[in-house]
C-alpha cells in the first residue's frame, strides 16, 4: 500500500482540504447551488448592462444592437433553417480536428517526453512551428489540400496539437522514476509501461492539455472557415461583417462562447471518469 504515496496523491490533498469546511461539510464556494448561481451571476450582470446601455441609447444601435435584436437575428436564422447548419458544421469540424490533433499531440509527446533522442531531434523544430500564426497556414493548406473540408480540419488539428504535445511532453519528463522502476520490476516495457504507469501518472496534465487544445480548436475554427467556406459560424461572422449585420456578428460570438463552454464541460465529465478509474 506504500505505493499509493506518490506525487499525484500529495497534489490532491490541498484541493480536497480547500473544498471541505469544518465538520466535513462542503465549503461555501464548493456547494453546488453556489457554484451554479455564481457561474451565472457575471453573465447575467453583463447581459443586464448590455441591455441597459443599448436601451438608454448610450451606444448607437448600428454599433451595438441590444440583446433582443440579437435574439431576433437568431430566430430569423432558425426560421430560414440556416442556424442549425452553421452550428452543426462548425461543431463537426472542431471535434474532428480536435480528435486528430490531440491523438497526434499525445503520440509525439510520448516520443519527445520519453526519449532523449526524440527530444533533441524534434523539440527545436516543433518550437519553431508552434510560433507560426494560424492564418499563415491558410495559403499553404489551400495549395496542398484545396478548398475542401480537409484543409479546414487540418488547420484545426494543428491548433489542437500543440497544447497536448507541450503539456504532456513536459509532464512525462518529470514522471517519478520510482514508479517507472516499479513497473519494470513487474515486467512492463514499451507500450504496456506507458499505458499502465506513465500515462496515468501524467493524467492531470493530459486533461489540462485537452482542455487547452479544445479551446484552441475553437479559436482556429474561425481562421479555418475563412478558407472559401460557405457554412459555419466563422463564415457567419465574415458574411455578417461584409453585410453590416452586427446583430449576427454578436450572435456568432455568443454561440462560439456557448459551444466552447459546453464542450469544455464535456471534457470535465471525461476528466472525472478518468481520474476515478486511474487515480
Image: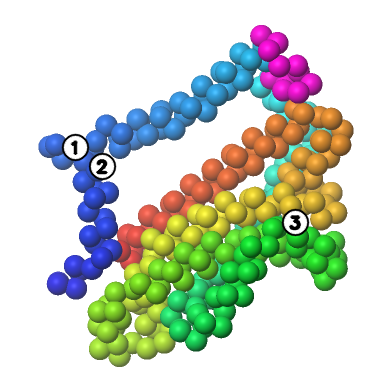
Q: Which mark is residue 19?
A: 2
The residue stretch that appears in magenta: 56-66
176 or 231, which is in the foreground? 176
Q: Is residue 42 above or below residue 108?
A: above
Q: In the image, which is nearer the foreground, mark 3 or mark 1?
A: 3
Calculate the distance from the C-alpha at mark 3 to the C-alpha at mark 1: 49 Å
Contact between labelled residues 3 and 2, with CB atoms less than 8 Å apart: no
Residue 212 in the magenta stretch? The answer is no
Q: Position of residue 25 (x, y in %)?
A: 19, 37
184 left or right, relative to 256: left
Magenta span includes 63: yes
Marks 1 and 2 in Cβ contact (< 8 Å): no
* Residue shown at 75% from the left, 16% from the top: 60
Who's the residue at 35% across and 60% down the image?
275
Which mark, residue 21?
1
Tell us which disc is closer to us: 2 or 3.
Answer: 3
Query: Label 3: which residue?
Result: 135
Amino acid at each position: 500500500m506504500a505505493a499509493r504515496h506518490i506525487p499525484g496523491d500529495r497534489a490532491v490533498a490541498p484541493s480536497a482540504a480547500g473544498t471541505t469546511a469544518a465538520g466535513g461539510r462542503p465549503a461555501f464556494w464548493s456547494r453546488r447551488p453556489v457554484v451554479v448561481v455564481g457561474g451565472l451571476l457575471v453573465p447575467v450582470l453583463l447581459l443586464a448592462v448590455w441591455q441597459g446601455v443599448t436601451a438608454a441609447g448610450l451606444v448607437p444601435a448600428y454599433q451595438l444592437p441590444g440583446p433582443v435584436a440579437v435574439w431576433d437575428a437568431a430566430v430569423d436564422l432558425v426560421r430560414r433553417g440556416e442556424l442549425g447548419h452553421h452550428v452543426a458544421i462548425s461543431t463537426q469540424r472542431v471535434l474532428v480536428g480536435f480528435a486528430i490533433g490531440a491523438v497526434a499531440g499525445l503520440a509525439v509527446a510520448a516520443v519527445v517526453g520519453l526519449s532523449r533522442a526524440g527530444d533533441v531531434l524534434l523539440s527545436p523544430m516543433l518550437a519553431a512551428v508552434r510560433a507560426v500564426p494560424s492564418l499563415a497556414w491558410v495559403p499553404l493548406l489551400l495549395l496542398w489540400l484545396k478548398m475542401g473540408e480537409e484543409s479546414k480540419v487540418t488547420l484545426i488539428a494543428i491548433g489542437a496539437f500543440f497544447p497536448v504535445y507541450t503539456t504532456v511532453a513536459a509532464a512525462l519528463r518529470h514522471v517519478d522514476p520510482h514508479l517507472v522502476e516499479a513497473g519494470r520490476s513487474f515486467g512492463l516495457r514499451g507500450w504496456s509501461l506507458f499505458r499502465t504507469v506513465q500515462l496515468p501518472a501524467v493524467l492531470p496534465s493530459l486533461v489540462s492539455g485537452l482542455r487547452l487544445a479544445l479551446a484552441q480548436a475553437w479559436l482556429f475554427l474561425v481562421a479555418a472557415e475563412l478558407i472559401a467556406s460557405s457554412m459555419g459560424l466563422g463564415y457567419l461572422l465574415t458574411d455578417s461583417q461584409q453585410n453590416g449585420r452586427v446583430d449576427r456578428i454578436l450572435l456568432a460570438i455568443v454561440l462560439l462562447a456557448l459551444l466552447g463552454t459546453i464542450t469544455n464541460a464535456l471534457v470535465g465529465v471525461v476528466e472525472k471518469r478518468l481520474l476515478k478509474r486511474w487515480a
